Image (cartoon, rainbow, N blue to C red):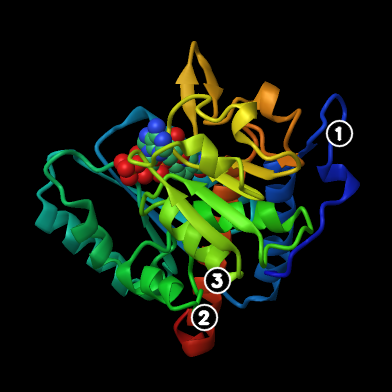
Amino acid sequence: MTAPEPLSNALRNTENLSATLLNGTLLAKRVRSQIRKEVKKLTFTPGLAVVQVGEDPASTIYIRHKQRDCEKVHFHSEVHRLPAEIPQRRLIQHVESLNERQDIHGILVQMPLPDGIDAQAVIDAIAPDKDADGLTPVNLGNLLIDRERITPCTPAGVIRLIESTAQPIAGKHAVCVGRSQLVGKPVGLMLLNRHATVTYCHSRTNNLAAVTQSADILVVAVGKPELITADMVKPGAIVIDVGINAVDNRLVGDVKFDEVKEVAGFITPVPGGAGPMTRAMLLQNTLKLASARGQRAPTEN
Ligand code: NDP
């Protein structure tokens, strides 16, 4: 499941592109198909619980997509909708009650949480062996010591996209633009674990272009539309655009796709790149958690 899969012709689309398009939608479909096969081998149904606090419309859409994904791979999924004004203590108790459930193998607390709730305190309440998002201190700590178990979904998806190019990672200069706990920082650690030479850039980086121009692998997770232009990209580089920005009623990434595709060797589109792979990795993590639990206590499931 974790072995790098070279891109098949189905995943390549070189028409009118000098770069090869990394099609996250197709790659995610392939991951789901593999997961379905693995689920058939289990004697129980993997279960994912998603906790939504408040009624953020974007969160509601993301959660609906996650539920549909679960259906596609025959997982049980449930959404726990809690009021925006719930006290933090009650929210943590709710998460703890999910930790106790034998039929729930993965828990995800949908971010952002309403103001006044300490998101980290809520994440801390998730049992590491049910942490479908890979964001608990234990799972992030495992990543830090090169013992990848459950890794955060977007970074895991980024790595799968890079691996799908069949280009070596070891020895390459990988530049992460963005150092968030959710995306940039763990992506850099995962690349480091694969022996890339990693540079992080962020809002205080001097002369961003000078750094990005030397990247063999460029991962951009900033949230600024079309920040990365063609002159900032090394010819032939692998460019992974994590950014999602709504501009004039359409979604654009952090990379100026139309011009960077003329320079890069491989590039992800927005939408259809890192987004679908993030969701696929949530399923992958849930399956891993379910399988591990099934092995520990098969009679309890
Ligand atoms: P954050 O806002 O948490 O982090 C943004 C990072 O970008 C920070 O490290 C910040 O630096 C850095 N930054 C800001 N401005 C600049 C700049 N001008 N030059 C260089 N670096 C800069 O965002 P996230 O990591 O959560 O998300 C990033 C983007 O990815 C967003 O568009 C988000 O919507 C998208 N996203 C997409 C997902 C998907 O599934 N495809 C999943 C998660 C996120 P500093 O640390 O100094 O503030």
Residue receiving disc 2: 292
Q: CA distance from mark 3 to mark 2?
A: 23 Å
Q: Mark 3, residues whose alpha carbon is within 10 Å: few (<14), some, or many (≥20)?
A: some
Residue 18 as seen in the image, left or right of residue 67: right
Q: Earlier in the sequence, mark 3 or mark 2?
A: 3
Residue 89 as seen in the image, left or right of residue 141: left
In this rendering, the label closer to the viewer, 1 or 2: 1
Three-letter amino acid code at the position of disc 3: Asn
Q: CA distance from mark 1 to mark 2?
A: 40 Å
In this rendering, the label closer to the viewer, 3 or 2: 3
Where residue 200 sits: x, y (%)?
Answer: 45, 52
Asked which secondary structure carries label 3, the reply is helix
Q: Name the foreground residue: 291 vs 216.
A: 216
- Image point (50%, 28%), residue name: 227
Q: Quadrant of the N terminus?
A: bottom right
Three-letter amino acid code at the position of disc 2: Ala
Asked which secondary structure carries label 2, the reply is helix
Three-letter amino acid code at the position of disc 1: Thr
Where residue 114 sits: x, y (%)?
Answer: 20, 39
Residue receiving disc 1: 14
- Image point (68%, 40%), residue name: 234
- Whether residue 23 is visible: yes
Q: Name the foreground residue: 44 vs 153.
A: 153
- Image point (52%, 59%), residue name: 198
Where residue 139 sits: x, y (%)?
Answer: 39, 71
Q: Name the foreground residue: 44 vs 284.
A: 284
